[in-house]
């Protein structure tokens, strides 16, 4: 029965065929969000103006900022001990801003190295203090989440990348640490509930589960700030943005607006608990297919599989081009693996329906 | 004749009446740009996907980045000695990044203080070197562009704010300096041709003449880089972004796309020479009206008037509320002055038609 669904699009012209968007990021957004986002570019809040051309201090846009913060707090259960900020610069900027704001000179922070982004985060610490890399999965091309390490008691914080977009691995439980955890959650924020108390700071580029590219969320426990001595440029000090509710300077208005719409959608769908249920259902379907079919194999190791990004290969690598062509013909977009891993990667963020995963599975079965 | 144009909107319901957008920023964008920008949120480049949900490394989006850079180079006549970057963080981030990248420890840079943004830029230098404030118009609430100063021969660069959005003043000729000029052009970029050779670095938040909020343009002369000794975090080093053509990390894709559309529009209209011609026509009309009508007076001094933002007051301040109400009724939006100056401010960026200025002038005449 599913087979018919799969064959049908092949007869359609590419321009009219439904595209199944498995892009790793910027990535799929819900259709109702896109519809409203497009409408606001023409006319916003009955103002007779586009959302792109109104003051960030207008009452209409201030309401967007307030709702975005409130939704993030509600969805992840964030209380007043923490600030919620919408900044710019991506996770790449947070790699150094976290150390700059949280790590006193001469002190150390523990890092678990689970891939490209962790490696980049570690590199940025040296200017401010010491990064103690207490565990790494580099030995097997970051194909697993390390185990069996101890977080030193004198670490100011422990930094982890909760989901590794490139390698397709994900922390399924938090490390045992007495210090606060600083987490790069760029590719799995809003995909599951969090245990807030364990975190000192969470950051995420918006362009996966949160919204379009152009804004970066930072959730920071207020009492951790103000403990470093160094000169911090105004724009790089979290306290600047906390004081001004993310509007110290002109914020990236439209990316924040679309992120807000997307959070409304997550809430309407049942919140992050429902997102987690769907993510597990989608991931289970795909991973079981990979395990069942002799032509395919997982790139990441069992137990470390990401619910967001499944990395897999063909056991016969010479057929890769054919599989990519089959995906292309079937309207499956963004499935090519990252060059660091090769093979394929199916990103299954919140907005990707189970039916798209089913469609991919059908293509795999037919292949 | 113009009077009829003016009276008509008053009869319309607010929601259907044409709005004349004098917002200081984020500010008015051309209607054809907004139309195409809205369409791309629904479907981009025949991909069956929104521009918000595609990879920044897709060939379709790479083409946007390339065209944005090429248009900026063409419009402002920028040759290969300079790099053109699309970053984030706003001009506020450039306040410290310029000093961080260009000012060796212990050296000094000259600054002309012409208002709020210059003052903020000056404040950020201290971490990296010395800001020598060689001229300031603070004594008369930044109502003029200073004259009669000498730029020290040992300054690494001279920093100016070419147009002062808040106070309504603008440099109409460049200071005499042997060192390169670093210019915050946030509110007048693309409004007139530039003498490229005089500049070492130009930066501008996009949300005035360039596009929506969310991206910051930096034009930098390559040979000025690499001369400072300090550790610069990867994301704060201009060379990182030059090497990767503004795609070291995920760029703010949609703001860049809309800026690109807007630059296409500027080019179609006749380029920056035509923008300058229109700006002068709009500004002349408004300033002459202010000078003619006894009820109004300019806030900025003669000779320093900005072609972008005209600041003015009522000679009888008690009637301010009435004038704002009259503007509101006539569909004139964003006319209230900044709290630092009071009164009114008419921002006349590229996308604002002469007819909107005429409409405002009609309201002023009728008042």
Image: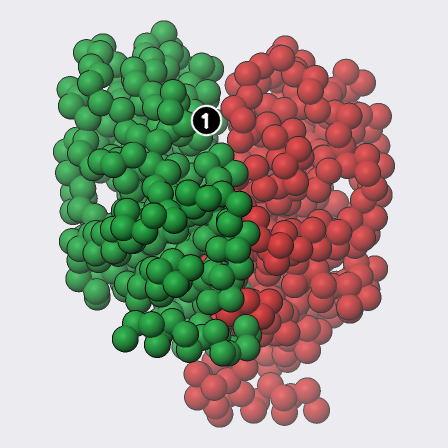
Chain colours: A red, B green
- Residue positioned most to the top: B106
Residue in front for this viewpoint, B77 or A10: B77
Q: Is residue B135 above or below residue A267?
A: above
Indicate the position of residue B26 as horizontal and vertical percent values: 46, 52
**In screen coordinates, is B165 left or right of A78?**
left
Q: Quadrant of residue A279?
A: bottom right
Which residue carries the number 1 mark? B120
- Residue at x-position 75% and y-position 55%: A71
Indicate the position of residue A212 as horizontal and vertical percent values: 55, 58
Residue in front for this viewpoint, B189 or B334: B334
Q: Is residue A202 above or below residue A325?
A: above
User: Quadrant of the image for the N terminus of chain A?
Assistant: bottom right
- Residue at x-position 60% and y-position 67%: A45
Question: Label 1: chain?
Answer: B
- Residue at x-position 17% and y-position 62%: B270
**In screen coordinates, is B224 left or right of A252?**
left
User: Quadrant of the image for the C terminus of chain A?
Assistant: bottom right
For numbered disc 1, what is the local secondary structure? helix
Estimate how packed mark 1 is, as few (under 14), some (14 to 19) or many (20 or more) residues with alpha carbons within 10 Å: some
Q: For residue A128, say whether it is visible.
A: yes
**In screen coordinates, is B135 left or right of B73?**
right
Indicate the position of residue B162 as horizontal and vertical percent values: 29, 36
Residue in front for this viewpoint, B210 or A11: B210
**In screen coordinates, is A150 left or right of A98?**
right
- Residue at x-position 48% and y-position 40%: B342
Residue in front for this viewpoint, A108 or B337: B337
């Amino acid at each position: 029965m599913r087979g018919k669904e799969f064959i049908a699009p092949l007869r359609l012209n590419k321009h009219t065929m439904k595209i199944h968007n498995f892009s790793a990021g910027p990535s799929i957004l819900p259709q109702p969000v896109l519809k409203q986002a497009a409408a606001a570019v023409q006319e916003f809040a009955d103002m007779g103006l586009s959302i792109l051309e109104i003051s960030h201090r207008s009452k209409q846009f201030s309401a967007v900022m307030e709702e975005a913060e409130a939704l993030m707090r509600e969805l992840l259960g964030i209380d007043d001990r923490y600030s919620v900020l919408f900044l710019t610069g991506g996770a790449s900027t947070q790699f150094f801003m976290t150390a700059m704001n949280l790590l006193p000179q001469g002190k150390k922070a523990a890092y678990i190295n689970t891939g490209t982004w962790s490696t980049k985060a570690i590199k940025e610490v040296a200017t401010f203090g010491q990064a103690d890399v207490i565990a790494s999965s580099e030995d097997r091309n970051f194909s697993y989440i390390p185990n069996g390490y101890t977080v030193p008691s004198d670490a100011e914080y422990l930094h982890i990348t909760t989901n590794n977009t490139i390698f397709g691995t994900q922390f399924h439980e938090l490390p045992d640490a007495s210090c606060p955890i600083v987490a790069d959650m760029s590719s799995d924020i809003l995909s599951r509930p969090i245990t807030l108390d364990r975190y000192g700071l969470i950051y995420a580029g918006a362009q996966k589960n949160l919204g379009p590219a152009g804004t970066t969320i930072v959730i920071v426990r207020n009492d951790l700030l103000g403990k470093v001595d160094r000169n911090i440029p105004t724009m790089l000090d979290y306290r600047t943005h906390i004081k001004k509710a993310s509007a110290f300077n002109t914020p990236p208005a439209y990316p924040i607006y679309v992120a807000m719409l997307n959070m409304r959608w997550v809430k309407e769908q049942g919140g992050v608990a429902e997102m987690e249920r769907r993510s597990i259902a989608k991931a289970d379907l795909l991973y079981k297919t990979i395990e069942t079919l002799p032509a395919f194999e997982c790139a990441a190791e069992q137990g470390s599989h990401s619910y967001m990004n499944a990395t897999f290969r063909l056991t016969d690598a010479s057929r890769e081009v054919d599989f990519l062509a089959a995906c292309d013909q079937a309207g499956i977009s963004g499935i090519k693996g990252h060059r660091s891993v090769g093979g394929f990667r199916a990103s299954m963020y919140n907005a990707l329906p189970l039916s798209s995963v089913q469609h991919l599975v059908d293509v795999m079965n037919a292949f």
